[in-house]
Amino acid sequence: MSTFILLHGSWHGAWNWHKVTPLLERAGHKAMALDLPGHGRDWTPASEVTLASCVDKLCAVLDALAEPAVLVAHSRNGIVISQAAEYLPDKIKTLVYLAAYLVPNGQSMIDLARTDSESLVLPNLTFNREQHSHELREEVFREALYADCSDEIVALARTLLTPEPDAPGATRLQLSEENFGKVARVYIECLQDRAVTPSLQKRMYSALPCKQVISMNTSHSPFFSVPDELTAHLMAL
């Protein structure tokens, strides 16, 4: 049995794994969904959230584990598991990028996001300069994030989504082949994604090859739309 640590993407929190966590636990695995700083029940002000603070929170959890864990990151927080792998490669069994940013050394998430001309995200952001955060316009929630999800999920998102801190996505990653490069990587691509589009996903996992690429015919949030299928893929690893 494995320990899975599940990281949400932009604006979300640990709550976005509420359908997957019980499925993993029912199969005998341990599943830990985290609220990163400034998200969910972690009330750190957005202006104080950095990539380092997000990575530190994850590394503290890894340090407390007796065995290496499988890290699963959605969307933006691919950058967090990559940087954590640089610091604690021996505490990580596999890095799983779920429609997530797989960013090379010396680049930032926003560097790649700006090249994703078909994405609905960047054209539909609103920025709060005082709080150093940004949000997605509500009118594109479904099309960008939840195209194949129920009305109940869209309503849940409207209630629980929080502003996204600016700093982590603009920070350049510091990765090496000796540390990050030695941890096994798996990419799960979402073929109907309008947030991190399939073309960008393919460019990322082609530039940093993974030991396995799994394709899902879903929009950006398969943990909501097809949790059983996603969980089956995770357990098969």
Image: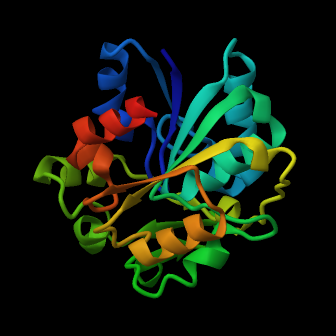
Image: 135 above or below 154? below
Residue in the image at 39% along x and 32% along y: 236
Q: Quadrant of residue 24?
A: top left
- Left or right: where does residue 126 sit relative to residue 219? right
Residue in the image at 55% along x and 74% along y: 203
- Left or right: where does residue 127 sit relative to residue 136? right
Q: Position of residue 201 (x, y in %)?
A: 48, 68
Q: Position of residue 219 (x, y in %)?
A: 28, 62
Q: Residue reaching furthest left?
A: 151
Image: 140 above or below 52? below
Q: Position of residue 84 (x, y in %)?
A: 74, 42
Image: 104 above or below 155? below
Q: Of 229 and 114, which appears nearest the observer?
A: 229
Residue in the image at 60% along x and 37% along y: 94
Q: Position of residue 105 (x, y in %)?
A: 79, 64
Residue in the image at 31% along x and 70% along y: 144
Q: Of 202 and 79, which appears nearest the observer?
A: 202
Image: 147 above or below 68? below
- Left or right: where does residue 143 sit relative to residue 99? left
Q: Of 157 and 209, which appears nearest the observer?
A: 209
Q: Quadrant of residue 233?
A: top left
